Image: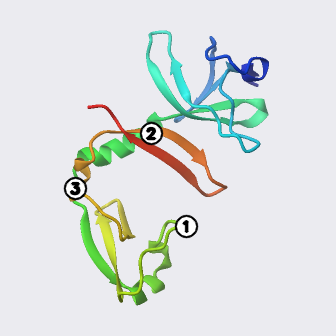
Amino acid sequence: MTEALFRLDAYARSCVAQVVAVDANRVVLDRSVFYPTGGGQPGDCGVLIGPDGTRVPVVEAMKGEGGTVVHVLAEGAEAPLNALVAADTPVEAGEISETELDANPGLVKTMSVQPPRGQGSVRTIHIPGVDLQPCGGTHLRRTGEVGPLKVVRIRSEGKRNKRVTIAFAEQ
């Protein structure tokens, strides 16, 4: 169980805590000032600072089992994104007919945005080995043109969806 210091002092900005569990990019502490997502209020984000001064960004605090607060670290999401950027993979534009798109609804991976229709075909964007999407937006020629990224926040949007906020990292 995590001692919920945020309940005792809503203005607390730091505390000394011990790591009690680590699982991939999730850390559980014995005590925390991070408010976990719940009741319509988003969870806190911030930084964990190790005894050697190492700073690890926390992109979300969420409720865990047994009254714990789980601190989700940015590193688990940032590494694969920055590896894709570093690979400098070509971004290929193509097209698919609206009939083909209707026969392959799995190509549309967003629930709220549909590709533009009405011209007989829909443009596709393909990053080989990564993704193929119908898309009407603007795109770079290569993934490396983006530059380094950092994950600012990961927020749950229901059982199946996460909203990931990404920012450009300082170079």
**Which colouring convention does the figure follow?**
rainbow
Disc 1 residue type?
Ser
In percent of width and height, residue 84 lies at 31, 48
Mark 2 = which residue?
151
Quick one: quadrant of the N terminus?
A: top right
Question: Residue 112 got which mark?
Answer: 1
Is 107 above or below relative to 60?
Answer: below
In percent of width and height, residue 40 lies at 73, 45
Mark 3 = which residue?
142
First-in-chain label (3 vs 2): 3
Is 90 above or below relative to 94?
Answer: above
Q: Alpha-carbon distance for marks 3 and 2? A: 20 Å
In percent of width and height, residue 93 lies at 25, 70
Is 67 above or below relative to 19?
Answer: below
Is 77 above or below relative to 111?
Answer: above
Disc 3 residue type?
Arg
Q: Quadrant for residue 75, please give it.
A: top left
In percent of width and height, residue 2 lies at 73, 23
Which SS class for mark 3?
loop
Confirm or deny contact between disc 1 and disc 3 (CB under 8 A). no
